[in-house]
Image (cartoon, rainbow, N blue to C red):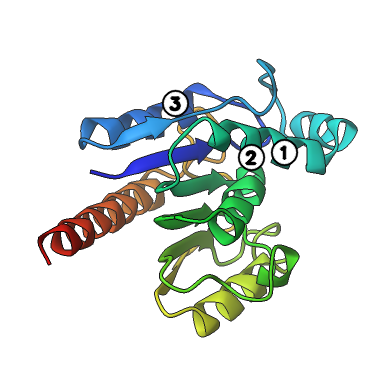
Amino acid sequence: MAEVLVFHHAYGLTEGVRGFAGRLRAAGHTVHTPDLFEGRVFEGLEEGVGYAQRAGFATIVERGTAAARELPAGLVYLGFSLGVLPAQRLAQTRPGARGAVLLEACVPVTEFGASWPAGVPVQVHGMDADPFFAGEGDLDAARALVGAASDAELFLYPGERHLFTDPGLPSYEVRAAAQVAERVLGFLDRLDRLDRLDEAG
C-alpha cells in the first residue's frame, strides 16, 4: 500500500485533516500528518494565513521538508491549500517521489524546477469558481501542469468554496468532498497496483 505525507491547510492540523488521513489509513495506507504550525489551530482562515505570513512561507515549506527527511523516499505527497507548497516542492525535488495530490491549490511548476518530474503521477482538485483556486492563478497553473506532465489529472467541482473537503469548516461541501476522497483513494490504489506490477516484473 502507499505511504502518504499529508500537509494541512491554513487553519492548522484540524480534526478534519486528521479525519481525511484516517480514511486513507482505514483503506490500508500508511499516513503521516506533520504539524506545520507547531500546535496552533486557528478559528478563521485570515488568522491562519496571517500566522503563515509572519512565520514566513519559506519556513512553513522547510518544516514540511524537515518532516519528509525522517521518512523513506517513496512517498505520495498530499497537500490541502497552503499545504500544497511543501507537497508540490517535495514531489518535484525529492528523489523517489511516488505521486502527488494537490487539493485546492497549485503553483507554477517553475517555482520548484524546470518541469514536472517524469514518472510522478499527480492529481489536482479544486472548485471551478473558488476565488482563491480559480481566481488567483492556481487553476491556470494546474491546467499547465496537466498539459505538460505525462500522468496528471485535474478534477473540477462546481462551486466557489475554498477548503470544501474539511468537515469541521463552514466551507465543507459533502458531495464534492466525497468525490475527492473516492478519487484520491482510487489514485493510491492505482499506484499500489503499479508498484506490485513492477515488483513482479
| Quadrant in the picture for the N terminus | top left
Is residue 5 toward the left or the right of residue 40 in the image?
left
Is residue 57 toward the left or the right of residue 134 in the image?
right
Q: Residue at x 42, y 46 (%)?
A: 75
- Identity of the amino acid at label 3? Arg
Q: CA distance from mark 3 to mark 2?
A: 19 Å
- Pick whichever, 193 or 24, lies toward us: 193
The spot of residue 47 in percent (x, y) is 79, 29
Q: Residue furthest right?
A: 54
- Identity of the amino acid at label 1? Glu
Q: Is residue 190 above or below residue 165?
A: below
Nearer to us: label 3 or label 2: 2
The spot of residue 56 in percent (x, y) is 85, 37
Label annotation for residue 62: 1
Q: Residue furthest top?
A: 39
Answer with the quarter of the image where residue 27 lies: top left
Nearer to us: label 1 or label 3: 1
Q: Is residue 83 above or below residue 109?
A: above
- Pick whichever, 158 or 151, lies toward us: 151
Q: Earlier in the sequence, mark 3 or mark 2?
A: 3
The spot of residue 157 in percent (x, y) is 45, 63
Q: Name the residue beneath numbered marker 3.
A: 18
Q: Are marks 2 and 1 in contact (CB under 8 Å)?
A: yes
Q: Name the residue beneath numbered marker 2.
A: 65
